[in-house]
Image (cartoon, grey):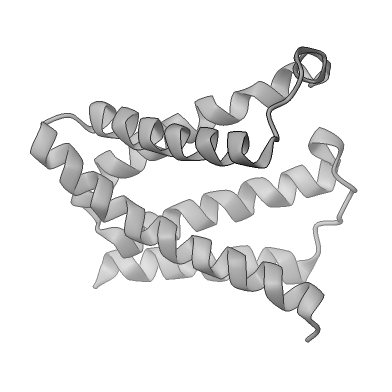
Amino acid sequence: MNIAILLPLSGILLSGIFLASQAPINAALAKSLGDPVLAACISFGIGFVVLAILSAVRGAWPSGSAMAAAPWWSWLGGLLGAFYVAVVIWGVPQLGVVSTVAALVFGQVAAALILDAVGAFGLPVQAITWQRLLAAGLILSGLVLSRTG
């Protein structure tokens, strides 16, 4: 495998580790605060401050015209992320990290199959193949197994 593939895969793998770790960390914050939505708000607030500083240091703040040119649906990412964080904070104490992450991954793969198949949001169309369906089925099997033991 060449570095052009290895580097992004490594970054995504590390991000997966961070996401799995973020779930129980945020759940502990919610337990301390007594509210999963407040914990999600604080998590996003800290993330916003860090990313705003990083963007400012890099000189990457967009112009008003660049922001206006973005498609309307491109602004929904924060809403979707807020829902994700709040639901994970709520779900981890009830399901555990493995089942929560397995359900998240299955949901992501199932949605990704459809998004790829229709070329959603300007993506190139990728066919739904038996290999991709099998991958989704194996993830679903992992989720079921995580709940039966």
The image position of residue 106, as x and y in percent, is 53, 56
- Reply above or below: 17 against 28: below
Quadrant of res 72: top right
Front residue (pair 32, 121): 32
Front residue (pair 110, 63): 63
Quadrant of res 147: bottom left
Q: Is residue 43 left or right of residue 93?
A: right
From this viewpoint, which residue is outermost toward the bottom? 1
Q: Is residue 27 left or right of residue 111?
A: left
Q: Residue at x 77, y 74 (%)?
A: 5
Front residue (pair 45, 21): 45
Q: Residue at x 83, y 17 (%)?
A: 69
Quadrant of res 41: top left
Q: Residue at x 86, y 55 (%)?
A: 126
Quadrant position of the N terminus in the picture:
bottom right
The image position of residue 91, as x and y in percent, is 28, 45
Front residue (pair 133, 9): 9
Q: Residue at x 60, y 66 (%)?
A: 11
The image position of residue 130, as x and y in percent, is 77, 68
